[in-house]
Image (cartoon, grey):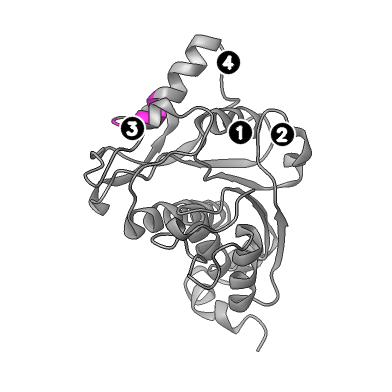
């Protein structure tokens, strides 16, 4: 039956919030360990209009934490594998996919002004810094995930306004970059972050602060990345709810 999966959510939030969740347009950058779980949380909560952005294919190393990554899907395009998974949950959803990387050079290709919410779950510091600047100069509500690698303690995950994020090397590096360049986000925005930073005990990784041009190569766990992603999705649901219910 159509949208039967949404009945429990509607029981909690009411038909007006449910209707609005079905109307808003969400643009999600990054479909990895954080983004894939965020997408699932959004669709299971009643979001029907979702655009997924990621340039990568599923690798064997993704299976430990990415929702759609299994031995069967290794080699598949991430956004397409994730779209297939989401449509199994919500066949009526409109899931668009963009198999491309966001960067300063490609930023104009994403038509960000057409969205109600923009979510950042990318792991390149250079690209994340650019996305923050671009997204916060649109009319969309923007939420951001800081780094979810090098962490095992789910009790340390929290949400704060970007300039109040503490103990996160990624957040500190982006703030430093903005101050050095005298460039600033268009408005305040909230981030999911975690102050825990553990060493890689199984080999040499790379510090988040060293990686401005490539994805971080650090150890990760499924529970932490999933909680980051679900929290990001929850911020959207909460925002829609509060705008209607108060």
| Residue wearing tag 4 | 183
> Does 239 lie within the magenta span?
no
What is the C-alpha distance between the residues marked 3 and 1?
Answer: 18 Å
Q: How many residues crowd mark 2 within 10 Å: few (<14), some (14–19), many (20+)?
A: some
| Residue wearing tag 3 | 168
What is the C-alpha distance between the residues marked 4 and 3?
Answer: 20 Å
* Sequence order check, earlier mark of 1 and 2: 2
| Residue wearing tag 1 | 131
- Residue 211, percent from left and from top: 45, 29
Q: Is residue 176 left or right of residue 131?
A: left
Closer to us: mark 4 or mark 2? 2
Say which residue appears at 48% left-offset and 13% top-offset: 179
Say whether marks 3 and 2 touch (CB < 8 Å).
Answer: no
| Residue wearing tag 2 | 107
Say whether marks 4 and 3 touch (CB < 8 Å).
Answer: no
Helix, strand or loop under label 3: loop
Q: In the image as oriented, which residue stretches furthest toward the front?
A: 203
Say whether marks 1 and 2 touch (CB < 8 Å).
Answer: yes
Q: In the image as oriented, which residue stretches furthest toward the bottom?
A: 1
* Sequence order check, earlier mark of 3 and 2: 2
Q: Which residues are magenta?
A: 167-172
* Sequence order check, earlier mark of 1 and 4: 1
**Chief SS of the magenta region:** helix
Residue 163 seen in the figure: no
Helix, strand or loop under label 1: helix
What is the C-alpha distance between the residues marked 3 and 2?
Answer: 26 Å
């Amino acid at each position: 039956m159509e949208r039967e999966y949404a009945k429990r959510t509607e029981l909690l939030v009411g038909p007006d919030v449910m209707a609005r969740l079905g109307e808003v347009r969400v643009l999600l950058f990054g479909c990895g360990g954080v983004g894939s779980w965020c997408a699932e949380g959004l669709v299971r909560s009643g979001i029907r209009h979702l655009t997924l952005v990621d340039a990568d294919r599923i690798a064997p190393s993704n299976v430990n934490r990415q929702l759609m990554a299994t031995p069967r899907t290794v080699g598949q395009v991430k956004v397409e594998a994730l779209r297939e998974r989401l449509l199994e949950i919500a066949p009526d959803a409109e899931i668009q996919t963009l198999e491309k990387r966001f960067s300063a050079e490609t930023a104009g290709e994403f038509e960000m002004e057409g969205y109600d919410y923009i979510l950042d779950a990318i792991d390149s510091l250079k690209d994340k810094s650019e996305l923050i600047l671009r997204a916060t100069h649109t009319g969309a509500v923007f939420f951001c995930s800081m780094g979810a690698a090098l962490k095992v303690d789910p009790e340390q995950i929290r949400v704060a306004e970007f300039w109040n994020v503490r103990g996160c090397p990624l957040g500190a590096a982006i703030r430093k970059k903005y101050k050095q360049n005298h460039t600033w986000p268009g408005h305040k925005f909230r981030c999911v972050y975690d102050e825990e930073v553990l060493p890689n005990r199984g080999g040499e990784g790379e510090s988040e602060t060293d990686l401005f041009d490539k994805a971080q190569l650090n150890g990760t766990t499924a529970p932490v990345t999933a909680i980051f992603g679900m929290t990001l999705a929850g911020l959207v649901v909460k925002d829609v709810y509060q705008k209607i219910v108060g």
